[in-house]
Each structure stands twice: as structure tokens, then as C-alpha cells.
Image: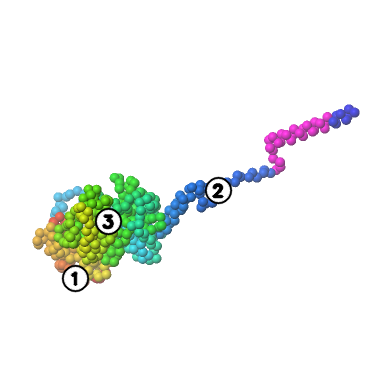
Amino acid sequence: MRRNRDWMKLGALVAIAAILVIGFTSMVDLPRDSMAQPVVPRPVLTSQPKQQPAIPEARPLAELGNAFTAVAEAARPAVVFIEVEKRTEQSSRSLPSPFERLFPQAPEPRIQQGTGSGFIVSSDGYILTNNHVVEGADRVDVRLPDDREFEAEVVGGDPLTDVAVIKIDASGLTAIPLGDSDSVSVGQWVLAIGNPLGDAFTFTVTAGIVSARGRLLRGLQTSTWDIQDFIQTDAAINRGNSGGPLVNIRGEVVGINSAIASETGFYNGYGFAIPINLAQQVAEQLISEGRVVRAALGVSIVAVDQEAADYVGLDEIRGVVIASFPEGDSPARRAGLRERDVIVEVAGEKIEYGAQLQTIVGFKQPGETIDVTVMRRGGDRRTYSVRLKEAETDASQTVASRPREDSDRPGSLVTRLGISIEEFGEDDARRMRLSPGQVEYGLLVTGVDRDGPARGKVFAGSANEGFIEVITHVDDTEVRTRRDLNAALAGVPAGDVVSLRVVQITGGQPQARFVFVRTTGNRQ
């Protein structure tokens, strides 16, 4: 009996121990298997499809961002980096010397470098940029987005619109489509693309809106013939962006980035672009004619204000006032227009502001007849037929440099010396304020090949700049014409040295020196 009770006690203790073990293991969550750790499942992260924003209301912004990306990628192959090199002259010594007048030294070249932007407009290498990017450049280099580099020819430039055309020797290029700047509206999204602040920031894209149209920047005016009709944008534009495209949301160029409004020289909220319709007209003439031919009404104009509108009975402030007529022939005056007339319509198009009038008239053909509608005091509205004349604009708008098909043309390259020349004439002497008999003949140096034998020995200039160099002798032979120069070089073996008597003229004071040039083997 006692033995049975002992076994019952032992069984109870075992049962109690088993219960305690089960309870303990459930509390501490010990692993069920002694040799293996269980795989702990990671939480599943839910996500929306990549093309759909998680917030439905944000979908338009996502689509706009995708559009910006697509436009930038489409434009990339056509936007180029431009590097220019300009050479100026400086004295070979920084301090004056008492021997300067007895032993004058030739000026040494000083190289200035700059960068800008441009965009390809034809598959065979024509590129649009700003005139101020390439004006006066001795060398223009273009780098494409694929890192190919080309030396570019300046086809022509027009400082009155700040448009220039350059060309590289390439084919199969991707051209960017040109849009219609007349259809650009304030508030429209645009992208400014270019190479701001030099090589480190090539192909930079900034976004903004068109914040105004028809802007006139008086600080940039260089001539009464300037045509300023800028598109204003708040897309960031900096130095180096000049010449790059302003692109709409369809990937079409609507302007050429050209200027900024800033006291520091860096972006300060507003940039300005030349309307592409104006730029395209300039570019087509530069390519086909080598210069820009403009028509003129023969009037000087000012903007209409409230008082002018009231004076002629206009119910809105628009148009331009004829302030005066220039001396000489004026087609507008001949046709019957008067001072104080307000021009409100030209060739069937309403005139809102001055640059619009300049653009419409400027790119008509000289000799063409157009209708001009004016308002006079008291609401008198009249229309006149005006036969346009050619505008007498500055010659600096003509070709900066063009291929020379005929090597005997003035200013062509003399390859044996590596210089470009033209005959020195009476007009040049007069512009240089020379007295009769000081320098009566010779060959004006208009260009020096950077890799030619005369580099660093003679220097190019122009009478308009107030600095020229004239070659009067090759050895002992006088040279007055290109034929004289060719004859003087005809018997000189390649590699031989010739002496050139060079007269440098600055401020009306000629000073002669001799330089020695080793000729090349290229014959004219």
C-alpha cells in the first residue's frame, strides 16, 4: 500500500514538472527544433507602378516632369559647346623705354578665350549662335555632345540682331526643330539649354516660363537700327548659355538665349532670348547672301504712351509714333506720312510696339511696296502705300569670314606667307587720318594664319579699329597689288626667307619696320 502511494507521488511530480516545462517554453518562445533557426519572413513593401504617382492629384506634375526629360533628351544631340580664341596686340614690354622711338618693337599677340553655346539647324553642319559669341574670333572650335571636335567657319554675323551662323565640316548631324516664336505666350513653359560658366557645366537644362515678350534692353543697343524683340524668361541663364536654344514643351526652338538682367553678371531672375522667327530670317540671308539686306521706311520712332494715344484718338495704347525723318531720302515722307503720326498697321498686321514694326519692315525686300496705316490728331485714320528702300545700316553686319572661292579676291589668303591682304586705298588713309604722302600704297594685312609662317611677325587690323599694318615691299620690290606680291614671291624657293617692309599705323602715326618670313611651298 505504501509502495502504491510512493508511485502516485512520483507520477504527480513528473506531471507537475512537465506542466512547468511546457509553460516556461511557451513564455520564452524557445525554438521548436534544436539544430535549426527558422527563416523569419520580411515585411512586404507595397509600391505603386512606376508610371503612376501614388497621389492621383500629382499625376499632372509627374507627366510634366516626364515631358521635360523627353524634351531634354531629344535636344541633347543638337546642342554644341563653342570655344573661341581672339588675338589682340600688346606691347612687348610693360614699362616704357627711352629707346622705344629709336628701336620700336612689334606688338606681341595676346590670346583671349571665351565659351558659348549653339545648336545645329541642318544635318550638314550649320549652327546658330549669338553674334557676340563669335564676333572678332580668330578661331572657333565646336564640340558635339558625342565629344567630336571641329574647327568652325564663321559664315556670317549680324550685330543688329546678335545672330550668327557658323558651320562645321560634318554630315548626318541631328538638327533641332525650329518652332514659331510668334505663337509663344506669357506663362508658357520653356527650357533653356546650353553650357553656362564654361566647360564644367556643359549641357545644363533649366526650366521656367515665358515671363514677357517684346522686351527692349536699352543697355544693349549699339545702333538705331538694332532690332530688339526679346522673349523674357525666368529659366536660369548664365554666361556661357549665350547662343543656346530656348525650347518649348514640344521640343521646338522658340528663341536663342542671349542676355541676362543682372548687376553681377550672373543669373538674377530674368533671361532674354532672340525670337527664332527673327533669327531664322537673319540666318537664311547670311547663308544665302553673305549679309543681311534690310528694307526701311525712313522714319525714327518712339513708343506710344497714354498721351500719344489720346492725341490721335486711339482707344488702346499701341503702335509707334513717328518722331522724325532722317536726312536725305525717306520713303515714308515721300508717301505722305508726317511727324507725330502713329503707325498702327503695316502690311495688314496690327502694330503693338517698335521692334515688331522693325521686324516686319526690315525683312521685306527693298523696292517692295507695303500699306502703312496711321492715326492722326482727332482720330483721322489714313493708309499710305510706301515703296521701301534699302536700309543704310553699318557694314559690320556683313560676313565675318567666308570661304574664298577665288584666291585673287581682295582679302584672300596668301598661303606662302600665311596672311590675308587687300589693297590699301585712299579711303583707308583718310580713316587713319594720314597726311598726304605719308603712306600712299601697299597691301593691308587683314588676317594672319595662326599656323602660318608670318604668325607673330605681322598683325591684322582695320581702319575702323584705328590700327593697321601695310606691307610696302618684299625685299626690294614695291608691292601695290596682289599681282605685285605674287610676282615678288614667284622666284623664291620654298623655305627661303624674304624681308617684308611693314608700316604700322596707329592714331595717324606711321612707323616702318622690317620683318623676315620663311616662305612655305604652297604657290598661289
Q: What numbered label is drawn on residue 483?
A: 1
Residue type indicated by callout 2? Ser
For residue 47, the mark is 2
Residue under label 3, please give it: 351
Instruction: Kindly identify the residue that appears in the image at 64 percent across and 44 percent down.
Output: 40
Asked if the residues shown at circle 1 and circle 2 are in contact, with their CB atoms under 8 angstroms apart, the answer is no
Label 1 vs 2, first from the N-terminus = 2
- Identify the main secondary structure in magenta: helix
Q: Is residue 12 magenta?
A: yes
Q: Is residue 213 visible?
A: yes
Residue shown at the point (13%, 56%) measured from the top left: 508
What is the crowding at mark 3: few (fewer than 14 residues within 10 Å), some, or many (at least 20)? many
Q: Amino acid at mark 1?
A: Arg
Residue at x 36%, y 60% (from the top left corner)? 178
Residue 284: percent from left, percent from top: 30, 64
Query: Quick check: marks 2 and 3 in contact, CB under 8 Å?
Result: no
Identified at 33% across, 46% down, the residue is 268
Q: Nearer the viewer, residue 69 or 321?
A: 321
**Residue 39: image location, x then y, percent:** 65, 45
Residue at far right of view = 1
Where are the magenta residues, as a range? 9-35
Name the residue nearer the viewer: 493 or 139. 139
Q: Nearer the viewer, mark 1 or mark 2?
A: 2
The CA span between labels 1 and 3 is 54 Å
